Amino acid sequence: MKKLLFLCTVLAVSVTVFSQARFGIKVGLNLANQKVKASFMGESASQSGDGILSFHIGGVAEIPIAQNFAFRPELLLSGKGTNMDGEDPVSGDPVDAKFRPIYLELPLNFVYAHELPSGPKLMFGAGPSLAYGVFGKVKGGDQDEDFFQEGVFKRFDFGINLLAAVELTSGLTFGVNFTPGLANITEVEVEDIDLKWNNTVVGFSIGYMFGR
């Protein structure tokens, strides 16, 4: 009897929480870059590429967890990458290498929202961001290859997402986020050298939340 009562209570709470959930859509620009760091015998050197413009598009959910606090997961198709100086493996000539991976990204944000007397709502939040590479290209000179290849680049990426946004009374939203990558996305191994390759993205978005 106690188990049944507990189950009914959990079910009732779940129904109440999800009945208050809101959903929306967003689209925007990514300012993406990648950083390479090599370590050898206690010495290290790093290089960042040239930032590129890419995009993100997807959906947003907002699930209340306490007064002024909500769980705000997103599911996005998100472009990352960079331009770096490289070398043609055949001729040895310098080339501009273009890295263009596309990820399916899942930022799991916990946000604080403050509604202004005039109506707009300010939001600030943070949370982990998980990503899985779905496709992409590496281009340089006459070379054009898939980005995600075994032994070259991993598909899984992980980072921390920081965000700030404003939602108008109409449901229109404007936001900015910063997502520094923490995962090493390369599988390339060089003898005696510890090689790390990370994504970084700054995103600017516009969206719409239903059911304000």
Image (cartoon, grey):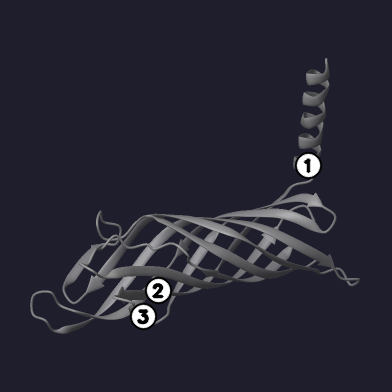
Q: Disc 3 and disc 2: Cα gap in Å?
A: 11 Å
Q: Disc 1 and disc 3: Cα gap in Å?
A: 47 Å
Q: From this viewpoint, which residue is outermost toward the bottom?
A: 94
Q: Position of residue 192 (x, y in %)?
A: 23, 69
Q: Helix or strand or loop: what does disc 1 sit on?
A: helix
Q: Position of residue 110 (x, y in %)?
A: 69, 58
Q: Is residue 124 left or right of residue 6?
A: left
| Pointer 3 residue | 46
Classify 10 Å Cα crowding around label 1: few (below 14), some (14-19), many (20 and above). Answer: few
| Pointer 1 residue | 17
Nearest to viewer (mark 1 / mark 3):
3
Residue 81: image tag:
none
Residue 171 appears in view:
yes
Nearest to viewer (mark 1 / mark 2):
2
Of the two numbered discs 1 and 3 on the same chain, state the one appearing first in sequence: 1
Considering the image in quadrants, where does the C terminus appear?
A: bottom right
Identify the residue at image location x=31%, y=60%.
Answer: 153
Q: Position of residue 208 (x, y in %)?
A: 68, 61
Q: Is residue 142 left or right of residue 133?
A: left
Query: Which quadrant of the view contains residue 8?
Result: top right
Nearest to viewer (mark 3 / mark 2):
3
Q: From this viewpoint, which residue is outermost toward the top?
A: 1
Residue placed most toward the observer, 198 or 31: 198
Identify the residue at image location x=32%, y=75%.
Answer: 38
Q: What amino acid type should be assigned to the residue bearing mark 3?
A: Ser
**How many marks overall?**
3
Q: Disc 1 and disc 2: Cα gap in Å?
A: 39 Å
Q: Are marks 1 and 3 in contact (CB under 8 Å)?
A: no
Residue 170 appears in view:
no
Classify 10 Å Cα crowding around label 3: few (below 14), some (14-19), many (20 and above). Answer: few
Q: From this viewpoint, which residue is outermost toward the left?
A: 91
Of the two numbered discs 1 and 2 on the same chain, state the one appearing first in sequence: 1
